[in-house]
Amino acid sequence: MTAQPRRVLVAKPGLDGHDRGAKIVARALRDAGYEVIYTGIRQKVGVIAELALQEDVDLVGLSVLSGAHLGLARQVLDALRANGLDDVKLVIGGTIPASDSGALLDLGVDAVFPTGTSIDAVVAGVDALWPGGTGGVPPTKAAEAARKETGVAAG
Amino acid sequence: MSQDNEQAPVSTESGIPVDPLYSPATTKLDYGDIGDPGTFPFTRGNFPSGYRHKLWTFRQYSGFGTADQTNARYKYLLASGGTGLSVAADLPTQIGYDSDDPDVTEEVGRVGVALDTLADAEILFAGIPLDQVSTSWTVNGTAAIMLAFYVAVGKKQGVPIDRLRGTIQNDILKEYVARGTWIWPPEPSIRLIVDTIEYCARNIPRYNAISVAGAHFRDAGCTAAQEMAFTLADGVTYVDAVLERGRMTIDEFAPQVSFFFYTHSDFFEEIAKYRAGRRRWARLVKERWGAKNESSCLFRMGCVAGGSTLYAPQPHNNIVRIAYEAMASVLGGVQSMFTSAWDEPFALPTEESTTLALRTQQILAYENGVARTVDPLGGSWFVESLTDAMEDQLVAIMADVDDHGGMVRAIEDGYVQGLIAEEAWKAQKMIESGERPIVGVNVFQTDETPADLQVYGLDADGRQRQLDRLAAVKRDRSPADVRRVLKELQAAAEQPDVNLMPLLVEAVEAYATVGEITQALRDVWGEYRQPVVF
């Protein structure tokens, strides 16, 4: 048997419709072995938390370009907790000033990827959220075996 | 990087191969296919005397916070020599939510000005006579409502409706693909666009009822050829829809259809894109729709220099990028241009950087002589050959869209979105691998600390002012009038052949809000459902 890949919900909260970056990150994580669901644009915070629950994801990745990242991150964290998803990790990317990174991390965001972060750095940053930087596939023996068998790198 | 240039790309960004040399031996020019400027097929430009007759419009996109703040910025821009206004509206206004809607409080006044009711529009243009400026609106989902605002403000100022000038972007198809301010599904949205085109043709002859825009496809990551081809395919969709209604001939409205693009950094390809697009459109108008007037064939376009070709590292390099892109736009023959400010990748532009952006255009217009001769690159073996190759690509991409059932179907299926996401992915990989050099970003980097990003948020005072104004308008208007006109609007919306524009003007004059009007139509038409492709 093979291990289940970790599941990621890439989400665009708020009204901003520019999702070039969100789609590139979604694809990069998929290529790195994660199972990726993308919400599409203009999602309400409640819907994002509901999807995270239904889809049983390990990570939610928010993309915010409108400047509303602090308020939206706070709302998403609250909504995740309200759904009992305290262990779901939250990362955020977009037009985020370096000076806001600390505040986001203090809120409980696990990692911040501002505009200009390379694809590789995003994938590495997401991988690093789990012990040993194991990324898309949890480090079970089955997974190791599967990886050797297929020769597919899992991030 | 060294002077050894063996590894330099040998094709344009759209993948058109480029030879080291063009000459009579490589390229046979057929002047009949090119034509003089101002004559069919308009390869060399729309007008016989080019910019000698009339310079392009310097149009700087601007709008933030509340209507009074933006009004002050407009007066400053006009006093500095700007010749047209360009309204940036906030996202709630563009998508049809009022500032007091609890779901949108974070977004009020953030990326543009908040316009809830006619009262805001009156303040926006206070002291700016609408018969003396042209105003462009980057609004799509709610474009018809913004047009109604403009007509109503003009009436209040005593300006005859046929003296109004400007453009509403009003292009919903690219919103479904790239920019995201859609509201209703394609069919009723296109019907509303047809209504505005008809209304402008009948009442406001100097107003562009639509600006079919490729710019947003481009910023989402597609190539220059895709940008132009998808835009032409959208244009075909709208024109077909107007003609299908059967109340106007092509010659009655074609002169009020305009276009809008991004000029990116591949200099000659951008010039070829504009020349080829102009020729392709002229041929479509004449051959597909049988226009009798040559003026119907004109491909009138605006552009932005900057956008996603600007970078935060070593930001002053952006000044140079914008200047080259602006020059390519002029050599391509655009009718209006917005030059981005160099600090745009990380901040809301300052008055200083905005002025420098405008100066960039003024230097091109008045100082270095590129505007002196019409289409100075016409007849260049290279540029004509690139123009031909670009037109071939446009034809091929448009045929591919047709094979997918036309633009509406190709968008509903996510086909176009998938093509663009693929190009965005490739471009990102090429920049990260260094295959596409970007000075200061992946070559010639320095270890200077980049400027921190600044984001603009409307201050609490501004938001409160907006909410107070909206509350006052709602208190002072006649609720019975609002209810009646919205009901009439809904009844008319159920009949596809009724033009909704007169009722929209009536609705805004009764001080119905953007959110109320949008919701009234959503109750009849439903909401668009996006396919998700990455």
Image: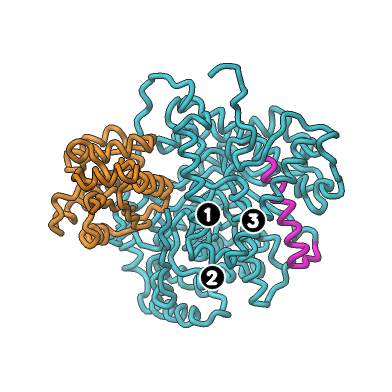
Chain colours: A orange, B cyan
Q: Which mark is first along the chain, 3 or 2?
A: 2
Give the crowd class for mark 3: few <14, some 14-19, many >=20 residues within 10 Å. Answer: many
Name the element at disc 2: helix
Question: Same chain for the residues at labels 2 and 3, yes or no?
Answer: yes
- Magenta span includes B249: no
Q: Is residue B520 above or below residue B99?
A: below
Q: CA distance from mark 2 to mark 3?
A: 17 Å
Tag 3 secondary structure: strand
Where does the image place residue B451, in percent across and percent down from the top left?
37, 28
Q: Nearer the viewer, residue B215 or A110?
A: A110
What residue is rendered at 26% in x and 50% in y? A5
Quadrant housing residue B239: bottom right
Let me know if residue B277 is in the magenta part: yes
Q: Mark 3 = which residue? A: B258
Q: Which residue is mark 1?
A: B137
**First to last magenta residue range:** B270-293
- Residue B97 drawn above or below residue B69: below
Q: Are marks 2 and 1 on the same chain?
A: yes
Q: Is residue A98 left or right of residue B77?
A: left
Q: Residue furthest front?
A: A149
User: Which residue type carries mark 3?
Assistant: Ser
